[in-house]
Image (cartoon, rainbow, N blue to C red):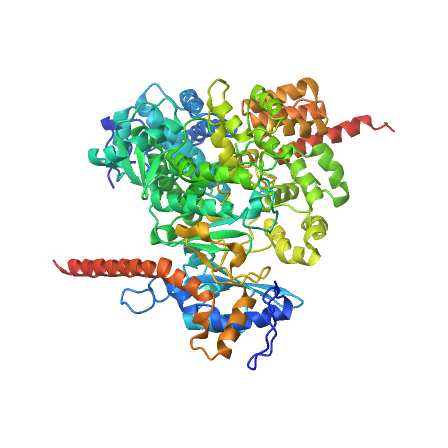
Amino acid sequence: MEIVRSQRRNGSDGSGSSASLPLYKSAPSLEFRLEEFGQYAIDRLRVLQAISDGLSRGKKPEEMENLVSEQWRANMKHQDADKTLRKDIISHFVLRLVYCREEEMRRWFLSMETALFRYRFRLQNAEAQKSIMNELQLQYNVLGNAEYETIKDKLTEAARSVNFTSNPEAVFYKVPFEDVPELVASRRVFILKGFAFVPRNQVVSLVCTIFRSNISKALALTNRKWRAMIQDQEKDRIAPMVEALGNVYLGPDYSKPKDCAEISLKDINQLASTSFPLCMRHLFGKLREDHHLKHQGRMQLGLFLKGVGLKLEDALAFWRAEFSQKVGAERFDKEYAYSIRHNYGKEGKRTDYTPYSCQKIIMSTPSTGDHHGCPYRHFSEENLRAALNKMGVGGRAMDDIMDKVRNRHYQLACTLTFEATHGTSCETGINHPNQYFVESRKFFESKNKHSQPTA
Amino acid sequence: MTKEKEEHREDPMQIDSNRVPTGSLLTDYLRIYYGKFFPYTDMFKWLAYGNDGKHPGCDSSYFGRREFSFTIKSDRDEVYLRFQSFFNASEMETSIKAKCPTKIDIGAVYTVDPAKRHAYAQSGFNPIERELVFDIDISDYDDVRYCCSGADTCLNCWPLMTIAIKVIDTALREDFGFSHILWVYSGRRGVHCWVCDSRARRLSKEQRSAIADYFHVYKGGENSLKKVTFAGPLHPFLARAYTDVLKNEFEKWVSTQKLFEHEERFHKILQLIPDESVVSELAEKWQGNSVRWEHLKHMLQSGSKKTQGLRRCIEEIVFSYTYPRLDIQVTKGMNHLLKAPFCVHPGTGRICIPIDPKKCEEFDPTSVPTVAQLIEELNANASIGADNYVEKTSLAASVHLFRTCFLEPLIKTCKDELENAYNTKIQQTKDSLNW
């Protein structure tokens, strides 16, 4: 493994970093104080959370670049570049410890760190980028002139389809398509006979894939080490801090409904019309109408209901009552009951699945016959207006919501819907369907309390 | 068009080749089909990918690590057996003949024999190889075809499947560089595609996802109006699909589905135009019976309207109607089970035969042999004392196609790869001995 020594002599951390953007290849042999442990981690977490937020609001890459730049400056940057680098490295490795412990946490951390890396990389100059690529031992081959001439037209065609006014790029890299899945998926590059032709400005994707893969492996390793020895060794010193840090920003995952929040089947219709967010109302409605939902729809609604407090037996009865009207009770028992139990962690590898957050739902893409996904994103304006009308939204509120939708702020639109249908403001903003439900119930609970006659 | 029922000395069963067999009749037919027709050796050769034990570089455990699943129907019940595996062709044959499944699915190749998975830790049992697969169903096009709906298909709407094969097959070969591609009729209303190059089999979930997304153009559930949107010039893949296939096919579609002769049909097309003034102008002029499609094209292409979103409107309309609609989840997963070729479709009795992509326009789903028909042919051959009874039935052509267009080139490549890998290993051992 190549280790590139930092330009400054007194920053030899051996973690394989270039002057300003480290790759976090191995834990640094630095000394630092316990207070720095917690504080640095929290500062970095603020940056990661801001990124998470920005992504779920569908911010464009340029906006994300600005966001990352600002957040980094606000939370991580120090006058002395060495100190910044030190904090960067320490905070990353501390958070690795915190987020290696559960699969959901690993996934989130991996995604946010990769995003952070992506935008920081884009902000580097060409030379810095080149040196990072060298460190990653990228086996990219620059496209030779002869071959370039034969496919020049297609390269231009592809570039124009991405960015209509792009000037012809001179340097291309010929890479197996397997190495750049994101570029292939979004049709941002020309591919021929299994090779993708990546313009230099797209090399970011290549680099990020490798970065992501390295961090992913590292997380798995850290997890094993944590369980095997660190957790025990450090139970009086670091372990409590790690636990605390793990609860800081993720927010409740709603997998275990709290405070007698169990609901029963007879309430479900009423609750659907007063307290379900639009995405779940839609799924619920379609289920009642068609007596069927496709797989992703079942997952999205089913896990939501679990988070809302529907017990397994009730869930089975509920789905059965609907599905048996279409496919018959027997087929339901055979084909669908299993996966419901699976969602509750009673089958297979017994994972207790968590209900989907807004971010996850927004990113999914429904297709023919599907009803999952975020309606604010996928419904046509007409259909969305109609659906919101049915919820009792109109007038000024409707316009505000549509405005948010047009600007792709889907969660803000949902928050405004909540405010319009409950007649109250929602300070925290909606980022999870179960949060919508919980807030809604809280509102109605307190309303009932106040309207009850005093003894 | 009923065929006469014939009675034979050898087989007292009366065959009506137009009736779709069910229940115990289906089981009887399947028994004969699996007894005489199902091409076990060819299927084994395919799925062994050269690991047939003949070459020292073979992995003899390879075939046994493949998951199969059987659906077995009896009068009262339907049983679904997963994680079936077989050590070799003869074990597979014995098992299929004994169980007579109504459906056989092929899954992934795992790290260990699926039947023994419980002996390994959770983390020890994982899929490691799997063909890249595609599943296209004509019922996903119900909103654009007016001759049939649901599970039905006819020669008027089947061209949608032909289009899908052409577009995807070309892209798989030209863009992705794959060459061992098998297209199979799914037996009723669609087609499956199996990409069997070793590069394809080793793709990760993420890479499969990327390929699925590359093909994903038609997006959005029933509540979004416009499922295809092109903001600017088309990517070379889409441009090629349009110029070589979709443009002309749409012209034909306009005519066979009479898209512009019925108001609710052309109304749907008008809904895809994001400019009110264009729409109302057209709607007004179309009160009479004019050449509407030409008129629409002319209007949108003339460039006289500068509205945002009109530049690619024609392409958007054409793609909305004709571009392949894949079941994305089938392609993305590594252990999704897909029906095996040469199965009998229980709903239609038809055999899931291969389709030659180079001649896919000639494929006629209404004349695919049925199991009843094959058995009748078999009996007819037997009664005239012909040799090689099966080879003289309608299935022979399909088996021949499978072998010549797909299996033989595939096996050659596999053997070459095995040979190379083996030689490299030998060389490395030799090198390490030199000091």
Across and down, in percent, residue A366 comes to: 56, 39
Residue projecting furthest to the right: A455
Q: Residue at x 29, y 23 (%)?
A: A125
Which residue is nearer to you in this view: B251 or B390?
Answer: B251
Q: Quadrant of the C terminus of chain B?
A: bottom left
Which residue is nearer to you in this view: A256 or A133?
Answer: A133
Across and down, in percent, residue A189 comes to: 35, 34
Figure quadrant of residue A230: top left
Q: Is residue A250 above or below residue A409?
A: below
Across and down, in percent, residue A426 comes to: 64, 24
Residue projecting furthest to the bottom: B9
Figure quadrant of residue A222: top left
Side of A418 where B128 appears, left or right = left
Q: How many marks?
A: 0
Query: Can the viewer see residue A313 in this picture?
Result: no
Q: Is residue A404 above or below residue A217?
A: above
Side of B418 where A40 appears, left or right = right
Q: Is residue A305 above or below residue B316?
A: below
Across and down, in percent, residue B196 comes to: 38, 54
Query: Can the viewer see residue A268 in this picture?
Result: yes
Q: Residue at x 25, y 31 (%)?
A: A131
Residue projecting furthest to the front: B289
Q: Quadrant of the N terminus of chain B?
A: bottom right
Which residue is nearer to you in this view: A147 or A18?
Answer: A147
